[in-house]
Image: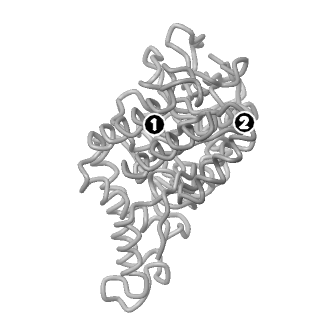
Amino acid sequence: MKRVHNFSAGPAALPTEVLKQAQSELLDYQGSGTSIMEMSHRGKYYTEVNEQAQDRLKRILGLGDDFHVVFLQGGASLQFMQVAMNFLSPDEIADYINTGAWSTKAIKEAQRFGKINEAFSSKGSNFNRVPTDSELSLSEDAKFVHFTSNNTIFGTQFATEPNTNGVPLVCDASSDFLSRPIDINKYGLIYAGAQKNLGPSGVAVVIIRKEFLAKQNKSDIPTILDYRTHTEKLFHTPPTFTIYLVNLVLKWVEEKGGLSYFEKLNTQKAELLYSTIDADDFYRGTAEVASRSKMNVTFRLPSEELEAQFLAEAEQADLVALKGHRSVGGIRASIYNACTLESVQALTTFMESFKAKNS
């Protein structure tokens, strides 16, 4: 069996320990004689898995009883629409902070349901940074303020939550979820596609403050798109095997030491990689230093020809999925929780060698 150093932006690397446990339980889950994905989603085995995943996530994030945790399908892309459908009416306004492709898509969907104030945009500088609080032009009567905490394509990240003067935050946290502690008191709703830090593709976690949800009084929402449908009961068949794997990842996060452990590890990995990039002008980071992501490290080489050579030789060295997003090119190393320090060390060693041969 061969395992490479995987820097995929998503679906991304999963912890080896999780994959091994899933492998061992694939044919016979806890002596039941069947796989977890062959069982009823309302039976005792899967019910326990779902409840464990919700409870573990609450413990990891420090959530009290004032939050709902639900697992939904459609990924973050559905949430772009579902958030606004549930919480905005045509005469109401929400503030959106535009820092990349995904927040741009979220704005497009939200405009179908209410008024959107673009409180900030870094489009003019090709989304190479996130704003300071003083740059935000917030509305006086916004229902919520939406931001994307980490931008996978452009390699930027909010170091802390934006200051909204008490207006609830709604966050697309897909690509840095569970990578560090957050101030949960500032949030009305958090959503995240699982396929980066939480598990495989196929499910999104949605965390909703009960007080925030109570303000949702719309009656014209399709049943399956109404958050209240899913907070009241298990409405329809969920992606059971995906959530089973999410539960195993959450168990792994807890056993490693929780968010403080991963904040320290992710900082160590990012500092190692950025110090290699900044050593001279052979590699060039694409994000402003103050906005750099600890999850998606984006950089360029002196020419596109060298970038193509870099990618080809990296793959030969078992360093895979380093090609930048098709919309921007370049190199991107995604170093989520399950990407080990050893993988980042292997990458930086390769980068030093490649630079020595080609500079």
Q: Which residue is mark 2?
A: 328
Quadrant containing the C terminus in the rendered view: top right
Give the residue drawn at x 40%, y 32%. Answer: 271
Q: Is residue 174 visible?
A: no
Residue at 30% over, 37% down:
264
Q: Position of residue 343 (x, y in %)?
A: 43, 52
Q: Is residue 17 left or right of residue 297?
A: left
- The amino acid beneath tag 1 is Leu
Q: Quadrant of residue 333?
A: top right
User: Is residue 117 depicted above or below 203 in this figure?
Assistant: above
Horizontal and vertical percent position of residue 113: 72, 34
Of label 1 and label 2, which has the lower sequence position?
A: 1
State the residue lying farthest toward the top: 134
* Rendered location of residue 274, percent (x, y): 47, 31
Residue occupied by mark 1: 273
Residue at (50, 26) in percent of width and height: 278
Per the rendering, the mark at residue 123 is none
Q: Visible in this render: residue 268?
A: yes
Q: Residue at x 63, y 44 (%)?
A: 82
Q: CA distance from mark 1 to mark 2?
A: 20 Å
Residue 357 rendering spot, x and y as whole percentages = 58, 41
Element class at badge 1: helix
**What amino acid is labelled 2 in the image?**
Val
What is the secondary structure assignment of the residue under circle 2? Answer: loop
Task: Determine crowd level at label 1: few under 14, some 14-19, many 20+ residues with C-alpha closer than 10 A.
Answer: many
Apparent side of residue 325 relative to residue 28 in the rendered image (left or right):
right
